[in-house]
Amino acid sequence: MKSFLLEIQTEELPAGYIRPAVDALCADIIAKLDSNRIGHGQAKTYATPRRLAVGIENVAPRQEPLVVEVMGPPERVAYDAEGRPGVAAVKFAEKNGVDVKNLYVRETEKGRYVCAEKKEPALATTTVLKKLLPGVILSVPFPKTMRWSDRKIAFARPIHQIVALYGEKIVSFIAGGIKSGRKTAGHRFMHTGKISIKSPEDYIETLEAASVIPDFGKRKNLMEKRMEACVKSTNGTIMADEALCDTVTNLIEYPEPVLGRFDASFLALPEEILITAMREHQKYFAIRDKNGAMLPCFIAVNNTHARDMDVVTQGHERVLRARLEDARFFYETDMKTKFSDRVESLKKVLFQARLGTVYDKVARVEHICGSLCKMLLLDDDLTTDILRAARLCKADLVTHVVDEFPKLQGVMGRVYAGLCGENERVATAIEEHYRPISSKGVLPATLAGAIVSIADKVDTLCGCFHAGLIPSGAADPYALRRQSIGIIRIARQKDLSFSLSSLVSDALTLFYDGAGDGENDAARQVFDFLKNRMENLLEIDGIAKDLASAVLSASADSVPDVWKRAHALYKLKTAPDFEPIAVAFKRVVNIIKKAKPSDTAARLDPGLFSDKSEKDLFLMVNSLNKQVNQHVADGDIDAAFSVISSIRPAVDLFFDAVLVMDKDQNVRKNRLALLREISEMFARLVDFSRIST
């Protein structure tokens, strides 16, 4: 068996495109080999800004043989009375490339049919790859693609060459007018001209000799070691930034870091500005001293080794100095205006055409924060700080620094609020109200930040549903799914037991003149949207779909309560007697659902009980109801589930002893009323009718 190599050599690819693209390329090749019955060993990806490559070990030289049984005509049609093959048998044999003597009869559900074993040809691997690889290459996914020259193909950047080798043999094909071969390019500056790859095993060594390190991990490790060597003279440490390391690794083919310095006067700027100016615009690494304070130094990683690296370093220093001068000007200009005075300027910033300005949004967020504080019974001091943070939470959007560095929104709000005399709780909440910035992102650490964050997200969610900006398919321009997940995650982590439906209804009143069908419909839509997100998150937490549905069907109004009930039900399901419990309770619910509402609404009369099982069940329901109510009030959901589970034997005895749908109308209604009492007892916890048994 030989190894296989595919390399697509291109113009410089965007750093963020590289890893997803090469991973998708590898997965597609493996899937194609598997579906075409070609055995193979381990696959490895290689990627730099100018190439995407996949190497696969021990690729079989041919497809595995495949024998398929093909069913033909019925025996009575294929053979005559003496068993001689007729026209139908002969034609069937010819069609499948077998001798008519090798046909056989198989008994099936439909009768006896003539069959044949058809052998699929085992093609050479190179033959299969020639057909597959053009489509594989041109289907590599990218966020954006481009066309170039007169070629009809699209790719992230123009393709220069394609290397395709099986062992030392070229897998010859044409993809988009580009013929495959063994030629590729070395480093753009340090090794000009084409290089030849003899075999997949020589790929890494050949490229490294041409100043290209194709292995991402090796290139990253070498870069980090050289950066550490550069920073030794400062007695400092490079600020940890894994994402920046990955980005820079995908910007270079060979790492040549240098240590640069900037004027110490710039350290008077907030360090967030310094770090962002270095990181976002220049991809430089910041350096801290042993005490965590920033040093007037940075690391820049080059993609080439120049004759005089001091000249290169000076170039980086000039560029950064200009950036920092701009940042200082913006910061000093911002400081001339009191931060709280900027709120009025938000009247000039449009949030959304149908939802008004950012100033309008801030007013709504303040209102929602007030409602949340009342629901949660927060003290006056905390409420005052939360409302103040809500008032100021968007003010930094009209600062010069945030205009230049958009990723600092919230961060600069905290900085400016603190510098203008706001207390720490208010300043921190301003920054935290944007969290989480992704579905799995960091949540607000403080309660004030959590409240303002929920209020901001609820306003956006309700406003967009009011405006008809409802997500459909992959289209979600206002990230409503992410914001809904943020609301749920924050409420769960902070154990904030407020009424989700009441909060949504309250937020929607700010968009409608008065309650009506439109407002009620929007409230249902928003609540169902949040409910669906809860179901998804419960499944991610390991709660089966039927259990999540059963819990949410009972109630989805309090996020912490939903999770407590879901995990209590999950624990109950592991009990050996869960199945009969679920079956018994489902029977209760189904009988209630099928009965006439007028029958189930009857008043329960213990005097109509005729059987001991009825009386015993009635007494037990009354006793357990009080216990369940107490456990729910105490938040002990496990104990509540344990209590309702204990009623199952009495329910079974009841069903065994009496007929619920008795001919006597009064008896029937009374028994249905008893079942209604049982159903209502556990309906506050779970809808057993939705559990699979």
Image (cartoon, rainbow, N blue to C red):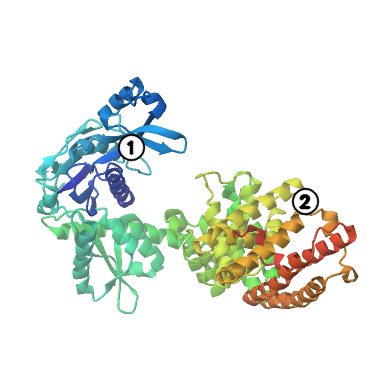
Q: Residue at x 51, y 63 (%)?
A: 435
> On the picture, is 274 further left or further right than 200?
right
Q: Position of residue 408 (x, y in %)?
A: 45, 60
- Disc 2 marks which residue? 515
* Residue 388 visible in this rendered orientation of the protein: no
Which residue is at the front of the view, 585 or 451? 585
Q: Is residue 224 above or below residue 129?
A: below
Asked which secondary structure carries label 1, the reply is strand
> What residue type is disc 1 on?
Glu
Q: Residues within 10 Å of mark 1 (few under 14, many from 20)?
A: few
Farthest front residue?
Answer: 82
Which residue is at the front of the view, 385 or 44? 44
- Disc 1 marks which residue? 69
Q: Position of residue 281 (x, y in %)?
A: 34, 55
Asked which secondary structure carries label 2, the reply is loop
Q: Residue at x 81, y 58 (%)?
A: 661
Q: Residue at x 40, y 63 (%)?
A: 273
Q: Position of residue 570 (x, y in %)?
A: 56, 68
Quote the CA–CA distance across marks 1 and 2.
68 Å
> On the picture, is 406 further left or further right than 640?
left
* Residue 165 visible in this rendered orientation of the protein: yes
Which residue is at the front of the view, 420 or 194? 194
